[in-house]
Amino acid sequence: MKTALIAITLLCLALASIVVMGDELEEQQQQPQWAVKVEEGHNPDEVAEQHGFINLGPVANLKNYFLFEARHQNKRSTQHAATSLAEHPGVSWMEEQEVKQHEKKRRN
């Protein structure tokens, strides 16, 4: 009986740590991202770096569209960097990307 109780306790602790690690991983993955159109003649890596972003690469097969990710830890500095990026002469369009949560419809 004692062994079973210890096993159940260890299992509960393991499951709790998995849930916590999953939440931390989800938070890390939710850095603000922008789809950005960078005009010809401008290097997207340099544009991203100048304004505190990382260029994650092209968006699908769209010419001159790239996904930039913010390196900032707080919302205010991220918004400041986004404003600065929007004013860059090589950026003609940008839009912050949003994670949308979808739930399955339940049938009654």
Image (spheres, rainbow, N blue to C red):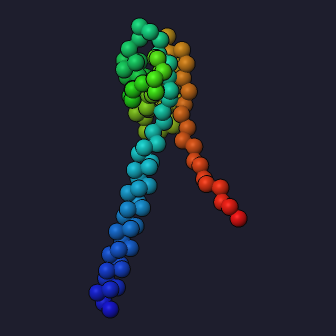
Q: Vertically, is 15 above or below 67?
A: below
Frontmost residue, 95 versus 83: 95
What is the quadrant of the C terminus in the image? bottom right
The quadrant where residue 106 appears: bottom right
For residue 55, side relative to residue 98 (left or right): left
Q: Is residue 84 visible?
A: no
Instruction: Report the residue that reaches farthest toward the bottom.
Output: 1
The image position of residue 24, as x and y in percent, is 41, 52
The image position of residue 20, as x and y in percent, is 41, 60
- What residue sits 50% from the left and 18% below the top? 37
For residue 96, side relative to residue 19 (left or right): right
- What residue sits 54% from the left and 34% below the top? 97
- What residue sits 46% from the left and 17% below the top? 64
Q: Vertically, is 77 above or below 8?
A: above
The image position of residue 2, as x and y in percent, is 30, 90
The image position of residue 63, as x and y in percent, is 46, 17
- What residue sits 36% from the left and 80% below the top? 8
Q: Can residue 103 be seen in this view?
A: yes
Frontmost residue, 23 versus 72: 23
Instruction: Report the residue that reaches farthest toward the left.
Output: 3
How many numbered callouts? 0
Frontmost residue, 78 versus 97: 97
Instruction: Report the residue that reaches farthest toward the front.
Output: 107
Instruction: Report the residue that reaches farthest toward the right.
Output: 108
The quadrant where residue 95 appears: top right
What is the quadrant of the N terminus in the image? bottom left
